[in-house]
Image (cartoon, grey):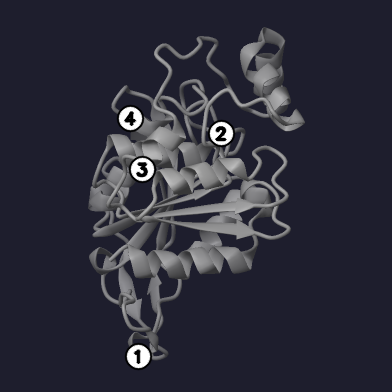
Amino acid sequence: MSDSPAGRVARSTVCPNGETVRSAPMRTFLSTADGVLIDSVYDPRSVVYETGALRDGENDTSGPPGDHLAFVVSHGFTGAADRPHVRRVAEALRRYGSVVTFSFRGHGASGGRSTVGDREVLDLAAAVRWARELGHARVVSVGFSMGGSVALRHAALHPGDADAVVAVSAPARWYYRGTAPMRRLHWLVMRPEGRLVGRYGFGTRIHHQEWDPVPLSPVEAAARIAPTPLLVVHGDRDGYFPLDHPRSLAEAAAGHAELWLESGMGHAEHAVSDGLLGRIGDWSVRRAG
């Protein structure tokens, strides 16, 4: 475990085939602004584009860490950095840049208790700061479900921290109970017996206190993050949030947002395909320059 993440930049060598190979992943606990320790993993980029293969307007990702981008991935509620679907996302995005994954407070090996998207903004801020300390000049924040709402609020509350934002399967507003999965989630969060199920059934420690004040909503945040590029991705078979959520986010960020409605896709990390992750990687390389 690293006591000084900024001092442990991964070394790199250039192979004859033009690929860049870096050292093994690093793992550490990051301290947030309110003193919570967040379990975090750095996966160096695995393959870089060949310079001659870039299309007009794309960025050359070859060179040392400061010359290419890093993705900071925020998982959904009850996820964690070590969950297989989060590892799959990280592995896919490593083709386009290095990847920082982490477990939100109350999840996995991180400390604290989940506030279901409120103070989690501080967790993401710590992970983005680590990516910058490791030498990355460009950072793309990629969030799924709850992590998508956190990515939006982080971009609004910490302008300039991220060079681009991708929100996948994110809600547009709080307290939505229009689907059966969201009604179950509210029971899990709001009821003492639900929080016990969260702790022992899902490995998620949920704070018992309600929001006070209610945090900035994702749709309000989307309206405030210009000129940061925003990509909103949502499946038309999402069982948690219907299509009015992504459309509201894109409309709020009109002029600097793109909306991808994916046919046949369900919800968040479990549903995102490798092909879609590749398209997200391509979009990030183009927009995070």
- Give the residue at mark 4: 32
Residue 117: in sight, yes or no?
yes
* Residue neighbourhood size for the residue with mark 4, other residues' Cα within 10 Å, grouped as few (<14), some (14–19), many (≥20): some
Mark 2–mark 1 distance (CA, rounded to whole Å): 42 Å
* Residue neighbourhood size for the residue with mark 1, other residues' Cα within 10 Å, grouped as few (<14), some (14–19), many (≥20): few
Q: Amino acid at mark 2?
A: Gly
Residue sitting at x 29%, y 40%: 3
- Give the residue at mark 1: 52
Nearer-N-terminus badge (4/1): 4
Mark 3 lies on a secondary structure that is: helix
Q: Amino acid at mark 4?
A: Thr
- Give the residue at mark 2: 108
The image shows residue 285, relative to residue 251, as above or below, that is below
Residue sitting at x 70%, y 16%: 194
Q: Nearer the viewer, mark 3 or mark 2?
A: 3
* Occupied quadrant, residue 272: bottom right
Q: Are marks 3 and 2 in contact (CB under 8 Å)?
A: no
Residue 43: in sight, yes or no?
no
Mark 2 lies on a secondary structure that is: loop
Q: Position of residue 162 (x, y in %)?
A: 31, 50
The quadrant of the image that shows the C terminus is bottom left
Q: Nearer the viewer, mark 4 or mark 1?
A: 1
Out of 7 and 61, give the one closest to the viewer: 61
